[in-house]
Amino acid sequence: MDQAIIAADTAWILAAFTAVSLMVPGLALFYGGMVSVRSTLNMVMMTFGGFAVVGVLWIIFGYSAVLGNSLGGLGLLGDPLEYIGLGQLLEAPAEPALPPALVAGFQLLFAGITVALISGAFADRLKFGAWMIFAGIWATLVYFPVAHWVFAFDSADGSVVGGWIANKLAAVDFAGGTAVHINAGIAALAVILVLGKRRTFPNAPRPHSVPLTILGAGILFFGWFGFNGGSALAANNNASVVILNTVAAACAGICAWLVVEKFREGHATTLGAASGLIAALVAITPACGAVSPMGALIVGAAAGALCCFAISFKFKLGYDDALDVVGIHLVGGILGTLLVGLLAVPEAPSGAQGLFYGGGLELLGKQSVAVAAVVAYSFIVTFIIAKGIDLAMGLRVNPETEYEGLDVAVHGETAYVMDSVSMTSSTKHQPDAVSVAAESMTTKAATAVESSS
């Protein structure tokens, strides 16, 4: 019977792994559709590039630093040498259990996506090389320690010590509201303050393709069921409750954002629906295993409404958060994590009891300490990393590149071919005049699209 249960659990996590992996192209499309036509591919490349760097580091030492035995038993960082290279995970466990290699792969996706989330905040102006270096350093110095705090649990026999937030503090974060969303959101703010505003701020380019953004949001929605549901690490009732709460919050978030948007702007927009969806999913991530379905509706609605207001903070406070990473991931992550302290019900998978259900202020206090710790650590270390890279090689592209768009200048590509001549390798051997004319037509078409948007 144990073997059958483990086989079912393994199949579910394999399916969840596949769903979460689709969040990488989903995020690329979500962000890529919201930027200028001249920087679309740069945004896509930042998503895939950052993810890839973190994936390499995860195999070498990241898994060990996150899920290894805590150094000195302090709960601050796993031993980065314990599972170096992950060769120890090739053999099947002696007792019936999830394959360690599957858990390692699943958590790799969390790490890579967290880093990729940050990139949306500084669209249109960051050097790609600087971004790749930042992604590796940030994952090492910020994500791996914080993920250890949150995701590494003590072993049942006490032989392995995990992170201090998960064990000593015992805060509730089912799928990564602190380690993923708050962490990414506050890091984005730190980099923005070093990088500076775009030349057009506060008048930023309009999204060049809202349908692409909606498609990306839909793929992210699909992946989120694996992200949250897979965090149950079993094909059981807990995963089912988590998935129900996730979809409930998503629906409420869309509705709430559109209502606020209608009253504030006079229109309920497609981009608003996508933003409300993501805001709600961010907020329910830490709370999906702690609240009832009605609680999930409250979490989703609160996130949709509050984040709709929060994205305007950048204009009042003067920081250029290009794609609202701060307004959605930081604000939504904090909201969802704190609402656990109010709305948690003991019947839910996490078994916690919030203030509104007779639990007193204890859980809310724990959630607040977890939020404060992640915000403080991530902001300070990220600011130092960004400042150091800026002094060493510069973070920002030159004004000419920023004006013309990053796709051609940085990657030598354009997202769309807007003339009858295909700019592929087959045309490289055509007469120079034809190639020059084709390139000129493409540039003029891109300029026309940008102007019309």
Image (tube, rainbow, N blue to C red):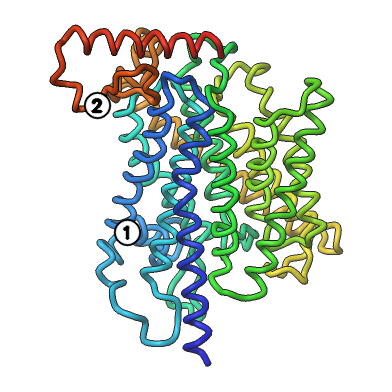
Q: Is residue 389 left or right of residue 430?
A: right
Give the camera-side residue of 406 and 190: 406
Residue 88 in picture, x, y percent from top left: 28, 72
- Can residue 395 be seen in the rendering of this structure? no
Q: Looking at the rendered structure, which numbered label has been put on residue 80?
A: 1
Label 2 or label 1, whichever lies nearer to me, is: 2
Pointer 2 or 1: first along the chain: 1
Give the camera-side residue of 334 and 220: 220
Mark 2 and mark 1 residues within 8 Å of each other at the beta carbon: no
Q: Is residue 382 above or below residue 5?
A: above
Q: Is residue 422 above or below residue 352?
A: above
At 62% across and 44% down in the image, what residue appears?
A: 372
Q: Is residue 15 left or right of residue 356?
A: left
At 21% across and 10% down in the image, what residue appears?
A: 434
At 80% across and 49% down in the image, what residue appears?
A: 298
Task: Report the amino acid beneath label 1.
Answer: Pro
Q: Looking at the rendered structure, which numbered label has been put on residue 424?
A: 2
3D distance between C-alphas at marks 2 and 1: 45 Å
